């Protein structure tokens, strides 16, 4: 009997990689996409449209994480063995602009799925996509499963709710519900407005004379960046472990946004030098043209300055560790962007 999985957020970066992983492992994968006026399936079109092979093992449904009825009906109809809740308004800066919607989707979305599991079949395993953003104003360094949360955005506060309601349903109803606390993970499929994708895309275009400038916010924030492909493997391992627990997933290495820019520039053989401070800091190319500027508009009302994780628990018990380092990640993202440019995109 093939295992059945249900992925909320299947059209996102992680949803796409996780679908491919689960299909490879022989699962039947059901994915929930939300209605939008323009197509939102570009990250999964390659596997969805492929005839005869994956098609019958990969089924898409309309649904929305803010709509309890659709969630209940889908779980009731599909009867999955495993549910991965990756659906979220996942942009931290945007969460300050649409805090109520973010809370509805990111916090209550988890509750809606958990309630459905308890009512329909308490044996269904549940993965909640938690975030290192929950550590926010960090209380210890590096962060592990015991580090207290101090969220700094409506997004992070919502994820803290989702984390604790997952723990609460696990303890109250003895269901197999787990939290992954994942640090930043990127890939060629990363959303265009997250900082790594924005940097790689812009610098590739600047190198090819298709763009003149890149505007950024706080380039001194530090992050622990991994590759999404490694991280979806951890999600799956979390649900295969003998008992339901919470897990930190990270690389244990940290770079600032500015260091990330310098690494990308170096790989592109784009010589840049920095001048100025604060909002006046700028990067110039060899011809002394300004190619990067700092804009107040990209700063957040409250920032998360310093994230670096410790995933020793996952290493020891899940036998998980990241396989791809920052150099691989950047090269992978650059290759994708250069190919897009070659194809006129
Ligand atoms: P992403 O690319 O933004 O994908 C989010 C997914 O959620 C998309 O499929 C999106 O649909 C869907 N979605 C948004 N609102 C929805 C709604 N109301 N109903 C149903 N689906 C909805 O995010 P990601 O990077 O893959 O991350 C996956 C999950 O992990 C998210 O919950 C994120 O918060 C969390 N997380 C991410 C990271 C990271 O560094 N990537 C780290 C820690 C935790 P559309 O395609 O239609 O927009
Ligand atoms: N997006 C963005 N755009 N960020 C910028 C910019 C810019 O122009 N300039 C500087 N930054 C800084 C942000 O202020 C932040 O400190 C850092 O770059 C990373 O920003 P993002 O790439 O937007 O990611 P994030 O860390 O806020 O959130 C991501 O990772 C979380 C895990 O820690 C998202 O994927 C979240 O969904 C995820 O939970």
Image (cartoon, rainbow, N blue to C red):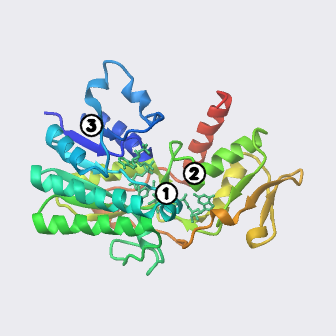
Q: Give how far across and how far down residue 2 sits, in percent.
A: 17, 34
Q: Which label is found at residue 245?
A: none
**Residue at numbered disc 2:** 193
Q: CA distance from mark 2 to mark 3?
A: 27 Å
Q: Secondary structure at mark 2?
A: loop
**Residue at screen point 55% across, 53% down:** 194
Mark 2 residue CB less than 8 A from any atom of ligand 2? yes
Residue 172's place in the image compared with 270, above or below, is: below
Q: Vertically, is 90 above or below 62?
A: below
Whether residues under marks 2 and 3 lie with C-beta atoms below 8 angstroms apart, the answer is no
* Residue where numbered disc 3 is placed: 30
Specify whether residue 322 is in view: yes
- Mark 1 highlights which residue? 91
Q: Residue at x 35, y 51 (%)?
A: 86
Q: Label 2 neighbourhood size at 10 Å, few (<14), some (14-19), many (20+)?
A: few
Mark 1 and mark 2 in contact? Answer it, CB < 8 Å.
yes
Image location of residue 54, percent across then percent down: 31, 26
Question: Looking at the rendering, which quadrant does residue 209 occupy?
Answer: top right
Mark 3 Cα shell of 10 Å, populated few (<14), some (14-19), many (≥20): many
Q: Residues within 10 Å of mark 1 (few under 14, many from 20)?
A: few
Whichever of labels 2 and 3 marks the residue nearer the N terminus, that label is 3
To which quarter of the image does residue 322 belong? bottom left
* Foreground tag (1 vs 3): 1
Q: How many marks?
A: 3
Q: Identify the mark nearer the N-term, 1 or 3.
A: 3
How far apart are the alpha carbons under marks 1 and 3?
A: 25 Å
Relative to 269, residue 151 above or below: below
Disc nearer the start of the sequence (1/2) = 1
Residue 69 percent location from the top left of the image? 21, 47
> Mark 1 CB in 8 Å range of ligand 2?
yes
Q: 307 and 42: which one is in front? A: 42
């Amino acid at each position: 009997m093939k295992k059945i999985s249900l992925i909320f957020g299947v059209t996102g970066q992680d949803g796409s990689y996780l679908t491919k992983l689960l299909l490879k492992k022989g699962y039947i994968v059901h994915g929930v996409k939300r209605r939008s006026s323009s197509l939102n399936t570009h990250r999964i079109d390659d596997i969805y449209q492929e005839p005869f092979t994956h098609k019958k093992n990969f089924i898409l449904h309309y649904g929305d994480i803010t709509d309890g009825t659709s969630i209940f009906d889908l779980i009731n109809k599909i009867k999955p063995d495993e549910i991965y809740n990756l659906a979220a308004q996942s942009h931290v800066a945007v969460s300050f602009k649409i805090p109520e919607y973010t809370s509805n989707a990111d916090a209550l979305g988890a509750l809606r799925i958990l309630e459905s599991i308890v009512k329909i079949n308490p044996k269904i395993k549940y993965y909640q996509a938690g975030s290192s953003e929950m550590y926010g104003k960090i209380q210890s360094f590096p962060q592990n499963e015991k580090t207290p949360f101090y969220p700094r955005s409506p997004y992070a506060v919502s994820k803290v709710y989702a984390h604790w309601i997952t723990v609460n349903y696990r303890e109250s109803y003895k269901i197999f519900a787990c939290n992954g606390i994942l640090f930043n993970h990127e890939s060629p499929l990363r959303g265009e407005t997250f900082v790594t994708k924005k940097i790689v895309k812009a610098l590739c275009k600047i190198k090819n004379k298709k763009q003149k400038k890149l505007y950024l916010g706080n380039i001194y924030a530090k992050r622990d960046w991994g590759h999404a492909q490694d991280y979806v493997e951890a999600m799956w391992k979390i649900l295969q472990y003998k008992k339901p627990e919470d897990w930190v997933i990270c690389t244990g290495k940290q770079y600032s946004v500015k260091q990330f820019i310098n690494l990308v520039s170096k790989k592109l053989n784009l010589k840049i030098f920095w001048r100025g401070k604060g909002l006046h800091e700028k990067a110039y190319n060899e011809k002394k043209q300004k190619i990067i500027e700092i804009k107040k508009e990209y700063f957040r009302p409250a920032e998360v300055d310093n994230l670096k994780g410790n995933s020793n628990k996952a290493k020891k018990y899940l036998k998980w560790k990241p396989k791809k380092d920052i150099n691989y990640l950047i090269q992978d993202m650059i290759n994708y962007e250069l190919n897009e440019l070659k194809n006129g995109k």
